[in-house]
Image (cartoon, grey):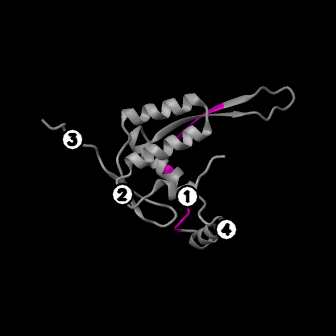
Amino acid sequence: MALPKLDTPIYETKLISNGKTVKFRPFLVKEQKLFLMAMESNDPKDIVNTIKQVLTNCILNDEINVEELSSFDLEYLFMQLRAKSVGEIVNLKYTCNNVVKMLKVMTKHVMVSLSSISTLRKSNQKFLKIIQKILKLQTLWVS
């Protein structure tokens, strides 16, 4: 008897760097557990590797190699994946450590909608090409 096939929704987005369409599925509970374990380790290298691993698992295009993507493409894909998997609203906590005499450290809670985040690619095409040449589409690495 064969195992049942899990039906998950398939979403599409476009890469910022070259406009290629990327098909992806939401991440599963087991992949969310990987994120929790990476966060507990407090090692930036583990966190980046986990993000790359989950993106590799969830991207359905065979021609997309996560290891060759630029850092801004990775970040954008991760935000899109997170929005479709967990929800489009992210609760952030920002702490201002600029302590001025007689003032306490200020903490602010902010809600950000991931669907409202956009790129400047269409309006700043020439600027983006210049930046791409300067950065030579550097891939994300952690020392």
Secondary element at tag 2:
loop
N-terminal of the two: label 3 or label 2?
A: 3
The magenta region covers 108-122
Q: Earlier in the sequence, mark 4 or mark 3?
A: 3
Membership of 111 in magenta stretch: yes
Spatial CA distance of label 3 from label 2 is: 19 Å
Mark 4 or 1, nearer chain start? 1
For disc 3, the marked residue is 5
Does residue 103 appear left or right of residue 41 in this picture? right
Residue 61: numbered disc: 2
**Vertical side of 51 occupied by 132: above or below:** below
Q: Residue furthest right?
A: 101
State the SS at label 4: helix
Q: Say which amino acid is labelled 4.
A: Ile
Q: Is residue 122 left or right of residue 96?
A: left
98 in relation to 124, above or below: above
Residue reaching furthest left?
Answer: 1
According to the image, label 4 marks what residue? 134
Q: Three-letter amino acid code at disc 3?
A: Lys
Q: For mark 1, what is the residue? A: 70
Disc 2 marks a residue whose amino acid type is Asn
